[in-house]
Amino acid sequence: MMSGLRHPARALALAIVLGAWVSASALAAGKPAHRAAPAQSSPAPAAVSEQFVDGIAAIVDKEVITLAQVDAKTVQVRRQMEQQHIPVPEASILRRQVLQQMINATLQDHEARRVGIRVSDAQVDRAVQAIAQRNRITLEQLQREIANSGMGWDDYRADLRSQIQDDILRQRFVEDRITISDSDIDAFLSMHADQPMDVSSVAAPAPEPEPEPAPAPVGPELVELAQILIEVPDYAADSVVQEKRQQAEAILRKLRTGADFAGMAAAASNGPQALEGGNMGIRPLRDWPDLFVQAIANTPPGGISGIVQSGRGFHILKVLRRGYAQRPAPRSAQAAPAQPAQPPAAAVARGPAGPMMVTQTHARHILIKTSKVVDDAKARATLESLRTRIAHGESFAELAKRYSEDASAPQGGDLGWLNPGETVPAFEQAMNALQDGQVSEPVQSPFGWHLIQVEGRQTKNMEQEFRRMQARRELMERRIGPAYEDWLDQLRSQAYIDNRLEKAAGGGAR
């Protein structure tokens, strides 16, 4: 079974916009990918000290990150922080934070090159179009918003390309390795037995006519969180753990006496979102880790949690916003003929008593992964050759056993009965376009290149199965963040990193 295809697709950080909750200008100042800018793109704003006479800020494996690159990116990050009204830490701290994110980005770039992940211009174009459509603006308006943010259009596209690449890496190396057992799902459903099943898509709050009073909110509660993370090294001595706790307690005291949370995050947090004021984004409350949900249970918007200890260290959380995904129609509108609502991806038809009739697809596939040796062109050519052999009478299943690089290969590439929304979008779109028995052209997904064959389709009442699918998705969302951080830790532990700014500040470097 190819577990990776079955994971819910993760949207790009810059492409997610929840209606009225996020403005186009906020999107234009979106999360920077912190890739190293060309050294000549901006003059270094600070003088280089004698200990950096070679102009090197860090070495990651064999790749050099120069001081000029760090200073150029620091100028960009400072400008974005100012536009987002995030207090900018002192120059030396900001510089070190920027360099740390550039090191992480460089490690991910190396990993992408190692496995042959390349993001095409066409993929970036599609992402740009999706962002414009979700913000209900034209491409020209989006370009103006980006220009107004102080970011060049080429830089914006480069950051998007980096985010697409990192999204593919997460899907391939993080989501695909998270195991959610049937017992995990059973326990989750038992804990949430009193909650109604949510089959609605997340939508923006609809404008309500005056003078109709606002109806009670319904749907999943959405929460936007920021964090300050004081990281504790693995296997740290008790004295180190206590030192880190005291550091977190000192930060919490400052916050409770009026210090700005975003500014403290930018200056002190070890989290990947530090330079965005610690903002971790918006998601349904139940999709946050249980530790976080418990810590903010009674915290209003603008409120700050106490110290939360996890396997990574000590967290301080701030609730930036909380609200609901949708509202019911006003009473005056309920008498009018209702417009048909867009059904969720998994539901084709739902009867009044609750049955959810779903069209399932029985499919097989052959997967060829890209690597340094096998690039996109070679993978596609291999599948085109296999497709020709299938057209001349060879068995799809037998070729899958011999050539597919997926865990389903021993079963002839058989993926079983697939529900809508259960595979990544590129795979599902190609599969849905096929007739029974038909074989697709080569299809690219985050996992490589596929040939897909549809064996048949059936309609089934999936109400109970959908509850389990939803539980699996929510458990996945809770585990992705920690798993992604663990994966980054593995990359760091396997790489040679000489962080000279950190050494100069007395923090040492591995």
Image (cartoon, grey):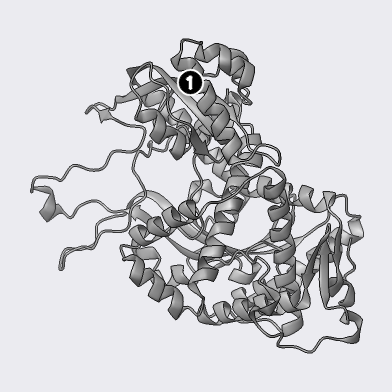
Residue 107 appears in the rendering: yes
Q: Does residue 274 lie above or below 192 as drawn?
A: below
Q: Position of residue 243 (x, y in %)?
A: 85, 65
Residue occupying the far left of the picture? 336
Front-most of 508 and 354?
508
Residue 92, picture quadrant: bottom right
Q: Position of residue 194 (x, y in %)?
A: 43, 35
Q: Please name the residue shown 9% across and 45% down the image.
A: 337
Q: Please name the residue shown 65% across and 68% down the image.
A: 274
Q: Position of residue 277 (x, y in %)?
A: 60, 71
Q: Please name the residue shown 60% across and 78% down the image.
A: 76
Q: Secondary structure at mark 1?
A: helix
Query: Image quadrant for the N terminus?
Result: top right
Query: Image quadrant for the C terminus?
Result: bottom right
Front-most of 487 and 264?
487
Q: Does residue 248 lie above or below 431 as drawn?
A: below
Residue 225 appears in the rendering: no
Q: How many marks?
A: 1
For the residue marked with disc 1, what is the amino acid? Answer: Thr
Q: Position of residue 378 (x, y in %)?
A: 60, 35
Q: Say which residue label 1 marks.
A: 388
Apparent side of residue 477 relative to residue 112 in the rendered image (left or right) = left
Q: Does residue 305 lie above or below 91 as drawn?
A: above
- Rate crowding at label 1 as few (under 14), some (14 to 19) or many (20 or more) other CA atoms within 10 Å: few
